[in-house]
Image (tube, grey):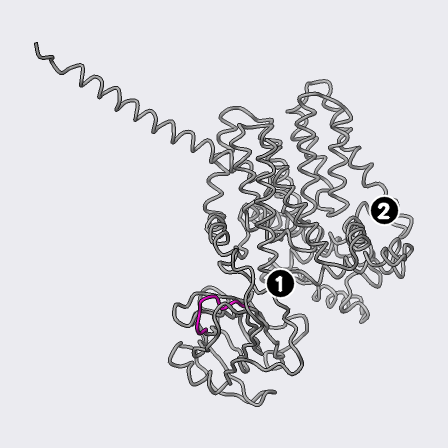
């Protein structure tokens, strides 16, 4: 067991380090990270009072829009290692790699050891979990305490102790210090799990202790909120804003008049309350009152349209079973050099708009023309249904070299994606996320700004590359955009080329992490446990997914909010794979035995020579 856990931890650590390398130039969600970091630095710099109640309590509620656990962790890391996001990200990766080990331990308590190994491999290799582990947000760190809680409940079922159950509740509370999403989970555990694990006559006591353990662990946050802000706020704000946005984004006909983004929420409130100072700030001024108003408006929609809302919840809940589409490991090592260019840096290759426009018509069906812009000229692109909007002429590059692509881009309509490809094979060397028009201001298509796209890439074995602009949506979606000059800056020789072979192996494994592959395994695991009447173990593994599908679906179901449910879903999928594999192997052995028996019978039937 020990050596398997070490191997699973090492594999998970390696996969996450490679994802770190792939994304080190463009980490996701850095804007939200800055909000947490601001509160953490208050502690590091000794401003305890401002961390306690913010700058202007109770009007400024920014300090309580999230629980304080993650800023506390950030402050501890910064105090030990300095203001280093690298150190904090390393802590993230180590903790999430330990989650793979915890999955092995939980599965080993319930299934044959092979299932535990498979579950650990699923968690270690999953591109969804690895990608989110490198975010400097509390979401991935909220999972390990919940896995420990499950492990404690399993141990308590075998050797019933009040203290063990109480510690399980405390672990759920620790998760709530990081993310408040699991706040109601102890009640689900008390109702759905405790009756299966413990004998009659003790269930009520164990359920009460479980809930009490969680409440006691989060009580300091509740007390802080009441003393500093004068309101009963169990953990944090933000439920109201996610509720109205979650309704607004699915209200395609705009019947309810609710906003669908953070900026739209502040604009809506500024107009409704005739308070221009609300625009652009979600929780200041009057943060608590505004949050309560959001909740009341959201609940009013639910009361007036309950069937519509419950259908929405069902849709979100079912969609939670889908694995998020994230980038799997790149086949080649990522750029490791700094992207900071010297002021006098000159590009190694430049393609001007006239050069792009001259090549465009021969390669795609999109319409292009030269247009005046702040750069003098730009390439104007229009398309109704072309998958590829623009393909540049080949640009010579040095092999095994790090490069930086720089491209000014204005998107007036639709969405697009920029790729760097090998000029001969069209193998993708780098790509941007799907890019959209700037939407956080009330901009018309004509007033959209040029946004500079910087995308690093490794040339690998390519002697020339092309830049491809492709539509970012499926189907026939009109796109209107403008592109400036394409510039390639040489940064230096590539590093970590030795990782190419493990990258290719891991990349091949990560291609299997699709909903179409995992969902049948999940249902097979559930069927096997139900067939064996192991309802207690099934309830233990299903309670976290069921909780998020029931509770989080009422608010908003972004993948990172419901990360904890996938760790136990992978255990069920591993059980399904083990059961199906056992059935297939048993059938094959049975056929081999029949063939062997029929062969023996045929030999016995042959008359002997005498």
Mark 2 lies on a secondary structure that is: loop
- Magenta-tinted stretch: 457-465
Kindly give the residue lying farthest to the left in the view shown. 610
Q: Position of residue 197 (x, y in %)?
A: 65, 24
The residue indicated by pointer 1 is 254
Q: CA distance from mark 1 to mark 2?
A: 33 Å
The residue indicated by pointer 2 is 232
Q: Position of residue 216 (x, y in %)?
A: 83, 36
Image quarter in which the N terminus is found = top right
Q: Position of residue 262 (x, y in %)?
A: 70, 63
The one of 558 and 68 positioned closer to us in this rendering: 68
Image quarter in which the C terminus is found = top left
Mark sitting on residue 424:
none
The one of 155 and 279 positioned closer to us in this rendering: 155
Residue at screen point 70% across, 20% down: 159
Disc with the residue nearer the chain's start (1 vs 2): 2
- Label 2 crowding class (10 Å Cα cut-off): few <14, some 14-19, many 20+? few
In the rendered view, tell whether residue 211 sits above or below residue 345.
above
Mark 1 lies on a secondary structure that is: loop
Q: Is residue 39 left or right of residue 547?
A: right
């Amino acid at each position: 067991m020990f050596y398997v856990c070490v191997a699973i931890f090492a594999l998970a650590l390696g996969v996450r380090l490679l994802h770190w390398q792939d994304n080190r130039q463009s980490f996701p969600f850095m804007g939200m990270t800055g909000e947490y970091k601001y509160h953490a630095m208050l502690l590091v710099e000794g401003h305890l009072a401002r961390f306690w109640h913010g700058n202007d309590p109770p009007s400024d509620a920014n300090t309580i829009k999230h629980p304080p656990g993650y800023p506390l962790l950030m402050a501890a890391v910064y105090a030990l290692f300095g203001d280093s996001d690298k150190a904090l990200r390393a802590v993230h990766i180590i903790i999430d790699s330990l989650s793979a080990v915890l999955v092995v331990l939980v599965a080993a308590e319930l299934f044959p050891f092979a299932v535990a190994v498979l579950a650990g491999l699923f968690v270690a290799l999953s591109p969804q979990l690895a990608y989110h582990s490198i975010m400097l947000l509390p979401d991935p760190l909220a999972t390990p305490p919940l896995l420990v809680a499950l492990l404690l409940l399993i141990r308590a079922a075998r050797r019933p102790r009040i203290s063990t159950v109480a510690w399980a509740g405390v672990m759920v509370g620790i998760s709530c210090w990081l993310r408040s999403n699991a706040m109601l989970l102890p009640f689900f555990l008390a109702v759905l799990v405790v009756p299966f694990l413990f004998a009659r006559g003790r269930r009520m006591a164990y359920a009460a202790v479980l809930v009490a353990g969680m409440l006691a662990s989060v009580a300091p946050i509740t007390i802080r909120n009441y003393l500093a802000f004068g309101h009963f706020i169990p953990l944090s704000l933000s439920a109201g804003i996610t509720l109205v946005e979650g309704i607004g984004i699915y209200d395609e006909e705009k019947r309810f008049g609710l906003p669908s983004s953070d900026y739209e929420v502040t604009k809506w409130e500024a107009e409704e309350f005739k308070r221009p100072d609300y625009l652009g700030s979600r929780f200041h001024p009057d943060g608590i009152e505004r949050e309560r108003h959001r909740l009341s408006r959201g609940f009013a929609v639910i009361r007036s349209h309950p069937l519509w809302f419950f259908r929405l919840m069902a849709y979100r809940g079912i969609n939670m079973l889908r694995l998020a589409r994230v980038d799997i490991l790149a086949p080649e090592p990522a750029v490791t050099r700094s992207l900071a260019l010297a002021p006098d840096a000159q590009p190694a290759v430049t393609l001007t708009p006239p050069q792009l426009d001259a090549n465009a018509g021969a390669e795609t069906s999109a319409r292009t023309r030269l247009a005046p812009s702040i750069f003098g000229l730009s390439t104007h692109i229009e398309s109704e249904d072309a998958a590829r909007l623009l393909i540049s002429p080949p640009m010579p590059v040095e092999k095994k070299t790090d490069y930086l692509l720089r491209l000014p881009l204005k998107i007036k309509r639709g969405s697009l994606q920029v790729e760097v490809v090998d000029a001969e094979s069209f193998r993708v060397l780098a790509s941007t996320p799907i890019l959209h028009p700037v939407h956080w201001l009330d901009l018309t298509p004509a007033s959209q700004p040029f946004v500079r796209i910087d995308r690093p890439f490794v040339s690998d074995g390519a002697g020339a590359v092309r830049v491809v602009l492709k539509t970012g949506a499926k189907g026939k979606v009109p796109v209107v955009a403008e592109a400036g000059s394409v510039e390639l800056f040489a940064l230096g020789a590539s590093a970590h080329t030795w990782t190419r072979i493990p990258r290719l192996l891991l990349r091949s494994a990560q291609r299997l992490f699709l909903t179409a592959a995992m969902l049948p395994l999940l249902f097979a695991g559930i069927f096997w446990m139900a067939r064996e009447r192991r309802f207690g173990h099934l309830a233990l593994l299903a309670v976290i997914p069921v909780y998020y599908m029931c509770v989080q679906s009422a608010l908003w179901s972004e993948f990172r909010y419901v990360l904890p449910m996938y760790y136990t879903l992978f255990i069920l999928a591993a059980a399904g794979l083990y059961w199906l594999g056992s059935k297939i192997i048993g059938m094959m052995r049975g056929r081999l035995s029949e063939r062997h028996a029929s062969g023996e019978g045929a030999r016995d039937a042959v008359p002997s020579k005498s």
